[in-house]
Image (cartoon, helix red, strand yellow):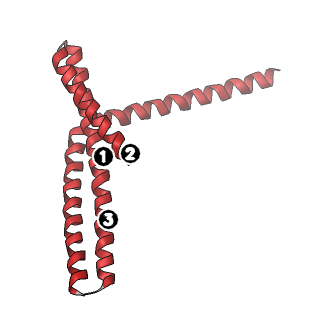
């Protein structure tokens, strides 16, 4: 019985240690994201804008290629590029919405801790709207 008890204690201790390390790393990652959320939202917005421009240009190019008879393969390729760019735009927009929601939630928590309930409610509404927008994008 002593060997099994000792072995069980060692396994339990090792699992606990790894759990604590994982918890520490997750908290560290959350802090990094929270500290840089404004920059992430700005970058995601820029990526979404560029991807939207690429999608628009590729769509127009595909129409011109098809209309002028340059070739169906070129038109198909440009259509594929436009579709991919629209996908990138959607993902970047989602990242931007998530970052905006995180930032608003942090502002709401900060305002609530200061006792400024009006600002906390306003920031909470922004975070809620951002969350609903992200949910709709995921459902699509």
Local packing at callout 2 (Cα closer than 10 Å; few below 14, some 14-19, many 20+) is few
Per the image, the residue denoted by label 3 is 83
Local packing at callout 1 (Cα closer than 10 Å; few below 14, some 14-19, many 20+) is many
The residue closer to the viewer here, 2 or 79, is 79
Q: Which mark sits nearer the N-terminus, 3 or 2?
A: 3
User: Mark 1, mark 2: which one is toward the viewer?
Assistant: 2
Q: Residue at x 24, y 49 (%)?
A: 44
User: Mark 3, mark 1: which one is toward the viewer?
Assistant: 3
Secondary structure state at the residue bearing disc 1: helix
Per the image, the residue denoted by label 1 is 94
Q: Residue furthest right?
A: 1
Q: Pointers 1 and 2 in contact (CB under 8 A)?
A: yes
Q: Which mark sits nearer the N-terminus, 1 or 2?
A: 1
Q: Residue at x 33, y 64 (%)?
A: 84
Q: CA distance from mark 1 to mark 2?
A: 8 Å
Q: Which mark sits nearer the N-terminus, 3 or 1?
A: 3
Mark number displayed over residue 138 = 2
Where in the figure is residue 7, as x and y percent of width and height?
A: 73, 27
> In the displayed structure, would residue 129 be above or below residue 63?
above
- Quadrant for residue 122, please give it: top left
The residue closer to the viewer here, 80 or 120, is 80
Secondary structure state at the residue bearing disc 2: helix
> In the displayed structure, would residue 86 be above or below residue 26?
below
Mark number displayed over residue 72 = none
Local packing at callout 3 (Cα closer than 10 Å; few below 14, some 14-19, many 20+) is some
């Amino acid at each position: 019985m002593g060997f099994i008890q000792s072995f069980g204690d060692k396994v339990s201790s090792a699992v606990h240690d790894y759990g604590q390390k994982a918890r520490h790393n997750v908290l560290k990652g959350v802090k990094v994201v929270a500290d840089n959320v404004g920059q992430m939202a700005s970058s995601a917005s820029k990526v979404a804008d560029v991807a939207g421009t690429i999608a628009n240009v590729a769509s127009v190019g595909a129409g011109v290629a098809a209309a002028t008879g340059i070739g169906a393969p070129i038109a198909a390729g440009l259509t594929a590029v436009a579709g991919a760019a629209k996908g990138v735009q959607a993902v970047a927009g989602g990242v931007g919405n998530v970052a905006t929601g995180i930032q608003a939630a942090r502002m709401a928590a900060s305002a609530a801790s200061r006792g400024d309930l009006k600002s906390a409610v306003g920031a909470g509404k922004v975070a809620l709207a951002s969350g609903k927008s992200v949910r709709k994008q995921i459902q699509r």
